[in-house]
Image: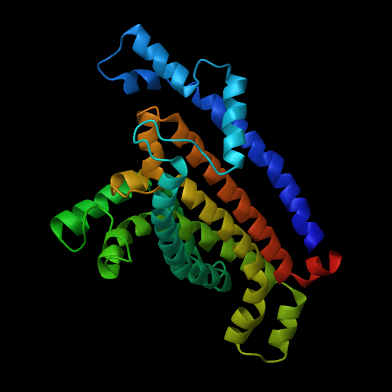
Amino acid sequence: MHIFLAKRLLVAIPTLLLVSVFVFFLQKLLPGDPVLALAGEERDPATLEAIREQLGFNDPLIVQYLRWIGAALTGDLGTSLRTGQPVLELIGQKLPVTLQLATMALGIAFLFGVPAGIYAAVRKRRAGDYTANFIALTLLSVPNFWLGIMLILLVSVNLNWLPASGYVSPFENFALSMKTMIMPALVLATGLAATLLRHTRSSMMGVLKSDYIRTARAKGLAGSNVVLGHAFRNAVLPIITLTALLFGELLAGAVLTEQIFTIPGFGKLIVDAVFTRDYAVVQGVVLCTAAGFILLNIIADVLYVLLNPRLRAQL
């Protein structure tokens, strides 16, 4: 296992380095000049030149990159040009918000997607199976931004059941935090539930055709014991791997949902940084997101090996 984990980490290092190269050089292609925004009303050439010199923007790009990546390796991701806060401090403030949203969304998706996938596999080519697939395709086809706006209009404006936007930490007021996060979590969970439903159905159908399942049924075991006790235990392996990948996508892809519901998470942070040409924040957030995604992939691989005896035996 140690050798397996070491190999995964060795692959992750050049991947993360390549991501850092892309994020640094591609963000230089963004339109606009952050120096102009910092200068404010004082836009005379001397002021602009002084700011560029202070920030190191006059140095060659390769020198700027090496300086940035060298500092990043020590835990210094730079300072926000807009707020003056260290980027690592900003990430520490926003990451828990997105983690809460992603965890709630994934929990809701699991609650509905996995049982529906099991049911669809058991009811293969029957009305239940066709209904579950129709619902999954419908949920995958609904855009998140449209669903979010419709939920705000119905639940918040017309029915006045839940807050339309905003965020409250669960450590300050747990009940209010759940109320503010349930709608955005539900919006994100729709597509995830559909994905989990389809993958669970596919995985379960493959396992239900196995010889040991036919043997278990021939021995007279109850249908629920065969499905949950035997089939699902083996079908859950690819679902665990998929879950880790989906969680990584949630951390990186909740931008629209956070904007619609005014949630101060990772997504809103990077959108604001792009609009204000806050390069240090853009670089730091994307680099941390990539590192998180790579870490989740490694965790998924390790869990897959730990839960699969045949793979463990090959190590």
* Count of numbered badges drawn on the protein: 0
Q: Is residue 284 above or below residue 248?
A: above
**The furthest residue to the right:** 314
Quadrant of residue 256 within the rendered picture: top left
Residue sticking out furthest to the bottom:
220
Q: Nearer the viewer, residue 208 or 156?
A: 156
* Coloration mode: rainbow
In the displayed structure, 137 sits above or below 52; it is: below
Q: The N terminus is located in which quarter?
A: bottom right
Viewer-proximal residue among 260 and 33: 33
The answer to whether residue 172 is left or right of residue 143 is left
Residue 189 spot, x, y in % from top left: 42, 58
In which image quadrant can residue 80 be found? top left
Q: At 72% from the left edge and 88% from the top edge, which residue is drawn?
A: 218
User: Looking at the picture, does residue 246 appear above or below residue 78?
Assistant: below
The answer to whether 165 appears left or right of 257 in the picture is left
The answer to whether residue 255 is seen in the rendering is no
Name the quadrant containing residue 139: bottom left
Q: Which residue is drawn at the image coordinates 46% and 23% (left, top)?
A: 55
The residue at the point 35 percent across, 13 percent down is 47
In this view, the residue in front, 240 or 125, is 240
Q: Position of residue 260 (x, y in %)?
A: 29, 45
Residue at the image position 67 percent from the left and 80 percent from the top:
230
Taking the image as shown, residue 116 lies to the left or right of residue 66, namely left
Residue 9 image point, x, y percent: 72, 51
Return the x and y of residue 285 as percentages of the image width and height: 48, 41
Of residues 177 and 261, the one drawn nearer to the viewer in this rendering: 177
- In which quadrant is the C terminus drawn? bottom right
Above-or-below relation of 311 to 79: below
